[in-house]
Amino acid sequence: MTDLERFKDDEAYYSDKSYMSNSAFKLLRQSPTKFHLWKQGKWSYPSTSFFDVGTALHALFLEDKEVAVRWEGTRRGNAYKEFKMEHEGKLVLPEKDYDLVYGMYDKLLKVPEVSDIMGIEAKPEVAGIKTFVTESGNEIAVKGKADAIVFDGEKNYIVDLKTTAKSLEDFKKSARFMLYNQQAYLYKTIFGMDDFYFLVVEKVFPYEVGIFKASDDFLHWGEVELNTSINVYEKRFLNEQFRPYSAMVGEL
């Protein structure tokens, strides 16, 4: 079985750390030490309902899968533990988060532009891999999993579903800071697609929806960010032994 075939399974894809990815590059840029510990299995992102809401919405909207169940009441005590055991394999969401998922889902279904961008033949959760070769000859294997790939007969493109706790305008302003430009360029390159779109839904009522195409300028700076990420990875982890106890030194 090839890695690409293996990565069709979510657990295999997300547990594999032999490949770099957009999220791995982001972590590296934020904290080389945390990245180093993550690669060793000694650090992971704290599990929060923030990620669970996104996971539940992705499964529901993109794959028509209900992976969450609604829990009413406190998460302390035996009743909650027993409920989790009864629904093993499901995301147990507090009623507020569960209702949020379905509020966003219902809004996505009602917005006509969403149906247009998703097309008729949207293929969800598609894994891809690509090897990048640096100027010094190092090979860096990178993986990506597209939320949806759409084939509309003329142009093929990627749709990436995002949720935002802020306004759509704030999402647009923060997209480069969040390295979404790097993601757009990386995924376009991995999958060989014509275009890349962000499908964004606000996490507060009335769950406003935005559809934003990655512009040529956005993609250009995404390429710049990806090259920076690759250079940092090569310098800190391929060309020298990483020192996890070094301090960040600089000016403000």
Image: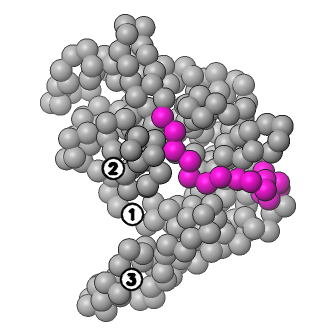
Residue lying farthest bottom? 79
Q: Counting residues from the N terminus, which is met first, the one under dot 3 or under dot 2?
A: 2
Residue 15, numbered label: 2
Start-end of magenta stretch: 113-129
Disc 3, SS: loop
Mark 1 highlights which residue? 48
Q: Which of 62 and 185 is in front in this view?
A: 62
At x 26% / y 23%, what residue is drawn? 237
Amino acid on which disc 1 is placed: Thr
Q: Residue 97 carries which label?
A: none
Query: Quarter of the image containing the N terminus?
Result: top left
Q: Tell me whether the residue at label 3 lies in contact with that at label 1, contact meaning CB atoms closer than 8 angstroms.
A: no
Q: With 216 as the anchor, is 37 left or right in this view? A: left
The mark lying in front, picked from 3 and 1, is: 3
Query: What quarter of the picture does the C terminus occupy?
Result: top left
* Label of residue 87 in the image: 3
Q: Residues within 10 Å of mark 3 (few under 14, many from 20)?
A: few
Q: In this view, does 46 lie above or below 95?
A: above
* Placement of 203 over or under 143, stated as above or below: below
Q: Alpha-carbon neighbours of circle 2 within 10 Å: few (<14), some, or many (≥20)? A: few
Of residues 208 and 81, the one drawn nearer to the viewer in this rendering: 81
